[in-house]
Image (cartoon, rainbow, N blue to C red):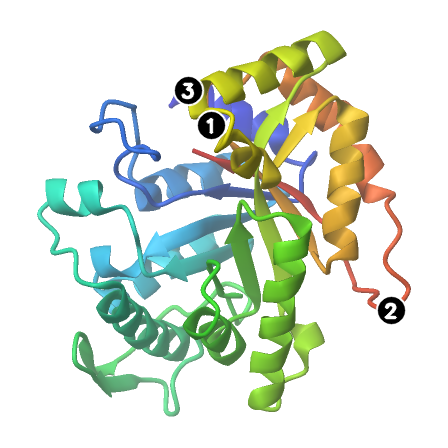
Amino acid sequence: MAELVALWQRLDGVVDWISLWDHLYEAPPAGGQTPHFEAIATLGALASVTERARLGCLMFCVPYRNPALLAKACVAIDHISQGRFEPGFGAGWHAPEFRAHGYEFPDVGTRFDMLGEGLEIISSMLSGGTDGSTTFAGDHYRVDAVTCVPGPFAGAIPLWTGGSGRTRTPENAAKFCSGWNVPYVGPAEFRLLNDRLDAACEAIGRDPATLERSVNLAFHVAATATAADAELARITAQWGEEIAPRVTAGALTGTPDRAVDRIAEYREAGADMVNVALRLPVDTDALEAYLTDIVPAARSIPWPAAAPRARWPVTVTLT
């Protein structure tokens, strides 16, 4: 934990967003042998030792917790951070950790039903409901005139959801959320999913420009060309020549200038935020190159003329 705190404080003020994930085991699976801290407790620590960066969770696994309790936890983290918290919510997918911790692992449709009900409850509680309370009865969750006092630090908490689903994910994002995140897709796939988000917003009369878009990218950058070649060779050896291109399609690879060019491709495809997923421990030279070379250069990438937005964050997710 001391190492994490030191890294969070190094990142705070350099990047715009620091996120944690809500996994109990590592991904891809390795039998639960990689150290993992539980997300809510760890986010409280992150909020208490940083001052500037927005904080997130991409994504809370809704089936792991009662949604009303999760809403209360989000408010606590939001107050600790003085209004910097922007949590995300997903349906979960990591079957080994579900089963190891005693959770049922229902089919994907049921998990998305649970997510939808959870978002109904959480979004209502965080907005005060219709009369200051929330009542809801679904197939999986129910609350009875539940209140959420205190409410969010600044009156509202932006909510996120994410994933590459083509139907229910865009619908949830448009209905409930301020932001959407998709992991590990290339720019062309990102653009296609982005178009589906626009359509989902338009279907309910929402301005698509009010929904923030981001992409998670794996971090395979190296500080030098020699180190970059070695990293690509390592990925190919690990995944094989057929699968390796799919791994790198949703990643930053090569030297810092190549990474900046890749970030520009996502911006052109409609991304408001590029979120680099660090799998610790991370190469120190590569991380310093990201913070000192890539981040400043990425901030200067111009907006596409057709789609200017208010901000262009460069961010980090730690796992």
In the visual, does 265 lie left or right of 105? right
Q: Which residue is mark 1?
A: 279
Among the 4 quarters of the image, the one containing residue 216: top right
In the visual, does 151 lie left or right of 133? right
Relative vertical location of residue 44 with respect to residue 292 in this rendering, above or below: below
**Disc nearest the viewer among 3 and 1:** 1
Q: Looking at the picture, how far across and down is residue 36, in whole percent?
A: 30, 30
**Disc nearest the viewer among 1 and 2:** 2
Q: Residue at coordinates 40% horizontally, 37% vertically from top-left?
A: 45
Disc number at residue 306?
2
Q: Looking at the picture, how far across and down is residue 270, in whole percent?
A: 72, 60
Callout 1 secondary element: loop
> Quick one: label 3 or label 1, which is nearer the N terminus?
3
> Quick one: label 3 or label 2, which is nearer the N terminus?
3
Callout 2 secondary element: loop
Q: Residue at coordinates 58% horizontally, 34% vertically from top-left?
A: 248
Q: Looking at the picture, how far across and down is residue 210, in whole percent?
A: 67, 74
Which amino acid type corresponds to the residue marked 1 in the rendered image? Arg
